[in-house]
Image (cartoon, grey):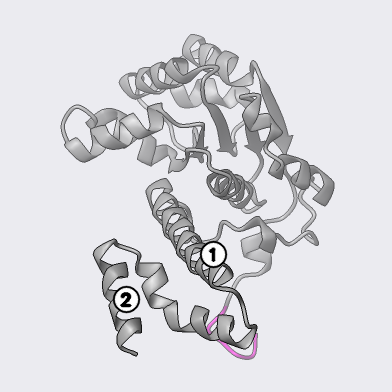
Amino acid sequence: MEKTKLIKSYCQQFNLTGMAQNLESVLQNAQSKQLSYLDCLVGLFQTEAQIREEKSLQRQLKVARMPLNHNLDNYDYAVENGTNKTQLNQLRELSWLDQIYNIILMGPSGTGKTFIASGLCHDAIKKGYKAYFRTMEDLVNTLKMKEYTRTTMADYKRLCKANLIVIDDIMLFPIDKPTAVNLFNFINQLFEKTAFIITTNKSPKQWAQMLNDEVLATALLDRLLYRCEVINLDGKSYRMKNRKTIFTNE
């Protein structure tokens, strides 16, 4: 027991918290399976590595600002929205990300655009890519405020080094000219260096109306659509179809 306490104190000294927390269980497993000293030591370091990887993943997901539901392992393939399991599995392989292709998910509200986009972002983070999820409002605020606060500038710099950026609900609302120019400059800066996933309920023709500038809309779409897969989703809203009620008789 004294030696166990001593090992834990050394673990804390060298910041091996995962090893310290799981020391007893690893030792018990080694004794029950009659493992060698070397195998026991390997088990301890494996435990530490796994816990560090999980903590790192959780930190990255927090910085990415993922929505609450973002795990495509829970995707409901019974939903008829214009995509299928084969297509989604191909997207999850992320070969398009390595080729710096963009994905545009287009369709009405509730057809799964955000869930698919955030799920692919989650997959990318798990595979070691620098990936971030931002709503259109989040991104616009970052571009506006990056010169005024340290935290916003730090977020902007992270985005500029990203492998993948999700922009959710782009063109949901009309935006003014300075904001539109900021958005164009940002995407133009990362053109062919960063992959984008765009979710939108507006057609490309409607983007000009939201920007109130056909030339700027054309230039923006030119860069996003150059190397891009456009996926049209349709069907009824999943949220409305599965809406919750406070009444037990409904």
Residue 237 showing in the rendered view: yes
Look at the image and say whether residue 192 sits in the magenta stretch. Answer: no
Location of residue 106 (image quadrant): top right
Residue 102 showing in the rendered view: no
57 left or right of 115 in image: left
- The quadrant in which the C terminus is found is bottom right
Relative vertical location of residue 108 with respect to residue 38 in this rendering, above or below: above
219 left or right of 146 in image: right
| Residue kind at label 1, given as amino acid type | Val
Location of residue 202 (image quadrant): top right
Residue 42 tag number = 1
Magenta segment: 245-250
| Residue kind at label 2, given as amino acid type | Lys
In contact (CB < 8 Å): disc 2 and disc 1: no
Residue under label 2: 8
Residue for point 47% across, 27% down? 210
Q: Position of residue 50 (x, y in %)?
A: 51, 62
Residue for point 28% across, 61% down? 14
Label 1 secondary element: helix
Q: Position of residue 76 (x, y in %)?
A: 73, 62
Q: Using the image as rendered, state which of residue 143 and residue 110 is in the foreground.
A: 143
- The quadrant in which the N terminus is found is bottom left
Q: Position of residue 199 (x, y in %)?
A: 58, 39
Relative vertical location of residue 56 with respect to residue 223 in this rendering, above or below: below
